[in-house]
Image: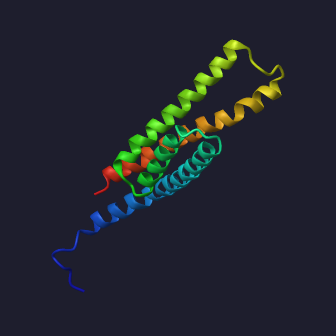
Amino acid sequence: MRSNRFDPPQAVVADTDRKVRRQLPYRTGVNLLALFLLVIALYIAWWAISFSTPLWLAGAVVAATCSLGLSRRNAWAEYLWYAIAAVSAASWTVAVIRVWLSSWPAERLAEIIIALFPGALVLVVCAGGSFVVAKHFRAKHNAP
C-alpha cells in the first residue's frame, strides 16, 4: 500500500490518539457536571416560581447557561463555572460562620455533622467540578 504524501506521520497520529484517550474521562465528567447544573437550574426555577421569588430565576438562568455552555464545550463556560463554584462555596462558608458566631443550633457532634454534610457536599462538587473543568479545557487547548 502506497502512502499518500498528505497522510500525517504515524507518530503524530499515535500522539493525537493518546491525547484524545486521556481527555475522555474529563469529557464525561464535564457532561455529568452539565447535567447536574441543568437539574439544579430546574430546581431553582421551580423554587423561585413556587415561593414567588423572581430574583432567584436569575440564578436558574445562570446555571442553565453554564450547563449549555459546558455541554457545547464553549470556552466561556469554564469561567462561568468557576464563578458559580466560587459564589456557592463562599456563600455556604459565610452562612456557616454567621450561624457559628451567633450560636450554633446543635450541641451533639452527630447533629453538627448532619447539619454540615449538605454544605460539605456542595464544596466537594465545586472543587471536583473545577478540577474536571480545568483538566478538560486544558487538554482541549493542548490538543493538536
Tell me the residue at 42%/41% (across/down).
Answer: 80
Instruction: Please give left or right for residue 91 compared with residue 22 in the image.
Output: right
Residue 90 screen position, x and y as percent: 53, 27
In the figure, 107 relative to 77: above or below? Answer: above
Residue 111 screen position, x and y as percent: 81, 28
Tell me the residue at 73%/14% (across/down).
Answer: 103
Tell me the residue at 58%/38% (across/down).
Answer: 53
Q: Quadrant of the C terminus?
A: bottom left
In the figure, 99 relative to 141: above or below? Answer: above
Residue 116 screen position, x and y as percent: 71, 30
In terms of image quadrants, where is residue 118?
Answer: top right
In terms of image quadrants, where is residue 68?
Answer: bottom left
Tell me the residue at 65%/33% (across/down).
Answer: 119
Tell which residue pokes out farthest to the bottom in this image: 1
Identify which residue, 140 or 73, lies in the foreground: 73
Tell which residue pokes out farthest to the front in this image: 52
Identify which residue, 1 or 139, lies in the foreground: 139
Q: Quadrant of the N terminus?
A: bottom left
